Amino acid sequence: MRILGIETSCDETAAAIYDSDQGLLSHALYSQVALHAEYGGVVPELASRDHVRKLLPLIEQALQQAGITRQALDAVAYTAGPGLIGALLVGAGVGRSLAYALKIPAVRVHHMEGHLLAPMLEANPPDFPFVALLVSGGHTQLFRVDGIGQYAMLGDSLDDAAGEAFDKTAKLLGLSYPGGPALAKLAEQGQAGRFKFPRPMTDRPGLDFSFSGLKTFALNTVQREGDDEQTRADIALAFEVAVAETMAIKCRRALQETGLKRLIIAGGVSANQRLRHHLHTMAKKEQAELYYPRLEFCTDNAAMIAFAGSQRLLGGDVQQALALDATARWSLENIETLIAAKAF
Ligand code: KG4
Ligand code: ZN
C-alpha cells in the first residue's frame, strides 16, 4: 500500500510517501521558522496561510522524489490534531479533497501517534510492548505502548511541556525562536557544575513532570549572577542537565514499574543530544534498549504521519466519510484502539 502523509499541525508543512512493502519512498518539508522568528513564536494565522501556499508544491515534490504519480497512491493520511486548528484544516482540506478526487480512503492521524511511531521508520524497529517518552513543544508524556492504538498514559506534564520549557528558558537567555536547539548549542560552552538546578518531582513517587519551576530558577539565576556570555552558557547547561536527568529518572521508574526493557523517545526534544546521552546511560544500567528516530524525524515531519496512517489502514481504520475533521485538543489516550491491528 502506498500512502501520502500530510503534516500541517503547527509551523512545518510536510508531505511524504510511505510504501508498506518498500518503506519510505520520499519526504519533503518546509519549515516556517524564519516567518515566525521576528515574533518570537508561532503566529497561528500566518502559519495557516503559509501552509496554503506550500502544501501542494510539497506534495508534488514528494511524488516526484518517489517517482510516482498521484494515481499510484492507495490512501492519504493527514494530521487531524492536536495542533493549531487553522493550520490543521489546511492539511485536512487538501488531504480529504485529494482522496475524494482519487477515490481512495483518507485517514486522520493523531500527531502524537505519528511522533510515537516514528522510531519504527528506522532499521531495527522496537517490538511491542515498550515504554514511550513523548517530548515535544506541547507534550511531555510517558506511555505504556502495547500495540498500534494501545496507549496507556503513565505520566504527564502538570505545567510547561519540555519543549515549551526549553523555548521559554532560551528566550530569557536572549536566544531566538525556536529556543531548544539554540539553548543546546549555547550549553556546549557551559562549565559543568557551576549551577545546580532542581530535578522537579523526582523526590516523590509518580511519573508526572513539572518543568515551569526550572524556567523561574533560570530567571532568578540570571538576575542574581548577571547575563554575561559565560554565565548564560553555564545556566543553559545546568538547565539542560536538569531536564535530561529528570527525564532519565522518570524513564527508569517507568521501566521498573512496567517491567519492560524497551524505551523509545520521540518528539522535537528527543533530538537533544544530552537527553539521549543521559537516557543511554540509564538504559544501559537497566539493561534496556533505547530507540529514537533519526534527527530529522524527531521534529515535525510527514514521514511519521504517512507511517502512522499506513498502520491505521492496515489495522482496518478506513474513513470514507467526507467530513472535514480536525481537532485542536485531542488526548492520545482517546484514540480509537484498532481491534484488528496487524503486525508490520
Ligand atoms: O515535535 P516538535 O517539532 O513540535 C511539536 O509537536 O511541538 O517539537 C518542537 C519542540 C520545540 O519546543 C523545540 O524547541 C524543541 O522541540 N527542540 C529541542 C531540540 N530540537 C527541537 N529541544 C531541545 N534540544 C533540541 N535539540
Ligand atoms: Zn510535533
Image (tube, rainbow, N blue to C red):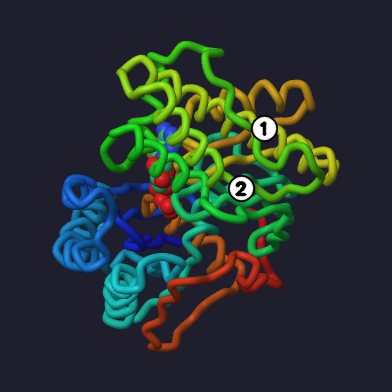
Horizontal side, residue 164 vs residue 156: left or right: left
Image position, residue 328 (x, y; %): 43, 72
Residue ID at (27%, 65%): 44
Q: Residues within 10 Å of mark 2 (few under 14, many from 20)?
A: many
Which secondary structure, mark 2? Answer: loop
Does any atom of ligand 1 lie closer than 8 Å to the CB of label 2? Answer: no
Q: Which mark is residue 90?
A: none
Image position, residue 146 (x, y; %): 74, 55
Location of residue 4 (image quadrant): bottom left
Task: Give the amino acid type for the residue marked by disc 2 in the picture.
Answer: Ser
Horizontal side, residue 129 vs residue 118: left or right: right
Q: Which residue is mark 2?
A: 210
Q: CA distance from mark 2 to mark 1?
A: 14 Å
Residue ID at (41%, 60%): 2
Q: Kindly tell me whether residue 299 is visible in this rendering.
A: no
Image position, residue 127 (x, y; %): 70, 44
Q: Which residue is mark 1?
A: 248
Residue ID at (50%, 29%): 240
For this rendering, which residue is in front, 1 or 31? Answer: 31
